[in-house]
């Protein structure tokens, strides 16, 4: 069997891979992650995928948990009047468990589990947000359209795969 992990976030209407390290920009010397595309597959224009998403194969549960911890460390957070650590993005943690049936000529089967941690909507007067954090709060609500598309993608993984989605609010 194989455990395959991927993690991404939807932040300010863009999708970012949480398992690919940020790279330094030439002009500002800041570390930034490159946004990924949400596009149709070559096989089916109706099915969309996050193009360029990094997937890591783990041999043990311990390795999978280490990958989860690394991805969570990359997630965008900020302090607000309500929380000292507030998610600024919708986070997706995807686990696929693949197993080959008896006989090497048979295809791999498996199951997939996606855990989604939604960034909560905020009232500016309650959280005392301003500036960039206030703009992020507006984008959190606006990005729910992308969230629906990502959830649809997860449910359309294929006929050989069982899909479960857990959402944390």
Image: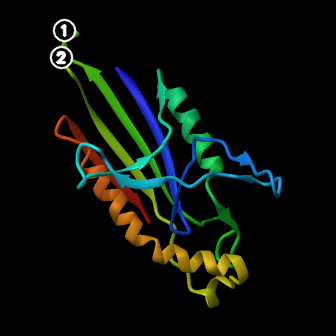
Tell me the element at label 1.
loop
Does residue 101 lie above or below 64 as drawn? above
In the displayed structure, 56 sits above or below 133; it is: above
Residue furthest out toward the top: 103
Q: On the rendered image, what quadrant is the N terminus found in? A: top left
Q: Position of residue 123 (x, y in %)?
A: 56, 86
Q: Position of residue 22 (x, y in %)?
A: 68, 46
Would you name the residue on which mark 1 appears? 103
Answer yes or no: do the residues labelled 2 and 1 have beta carbons within 8 Å?
yes
Crowdedness near tag 2: few (<14), some (14–19) or many (≥20) residues, C-alpha within 10 Å: few
Q: Which mark is residue 106?
A: 2
Disc 2, SS: loop
Left or right placement of residue 40 versus residue 18 in this view: left
Residue 68 is left or right of residue 104, and the answer is right
In this rendering, is residue 126 above or below 53? Answer: below
Q: Quadrant of residue 89?
A: bottom right
| Label drawn at residue 56 | none
Q: Is residue 19 above or below residue 101?
A: below
Q: Quadrant of residue 75?
A: bottom right
**Residue 57: x percent and y percent?**
47, 27
Residue at image point 18% right, 9% down: 103
* Residue shown at the point (28%, 47%) measured from the top left: 164
Q: In which quadrant will I find the C terminus?
A: bottom left
Farthest residue, direction bottom:
125
Instruction: Check disc 1: other Cα within 10 Å, few if <14, some if 14-19, many if 20+.
Output: few
């Amino acid at each position: 069997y194989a455990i395959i992990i991927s993690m991404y976030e939807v932040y300010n209407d863009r999708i970012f891979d949480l398992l690919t390290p940020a790279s330094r920009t030439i002009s500002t010397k800041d570390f930034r992650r490159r946004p990924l595309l949400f596009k149709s597959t070559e096989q089916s224009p109706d099915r969309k995928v996050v193009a360029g998403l990094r997937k890591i194969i783990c041999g043990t549960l311990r390795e999978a948990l280490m990958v989860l911890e690394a991805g969570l460390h990359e997630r965008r957070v900020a302090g607000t009047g309500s929380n000292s650590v507030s998610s600024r993005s919708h986070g997706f943690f995807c686990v696929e468990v693949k197993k080959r049936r008896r006989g090497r000529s048979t295809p791999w089967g498996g199951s997939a589990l996606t855990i989604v941690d939604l960034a909560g909507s905020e009232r500016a007067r309650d959280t005392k947000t301003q500036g960039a954090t206030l703009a992020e709060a507006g984008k959190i609500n606006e990005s729910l359209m992308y969230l629906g598309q990502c959830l649809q993608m997860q449910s359309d993984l294929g006929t050989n795969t069982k899909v479960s989605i857990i959402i944390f609010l």
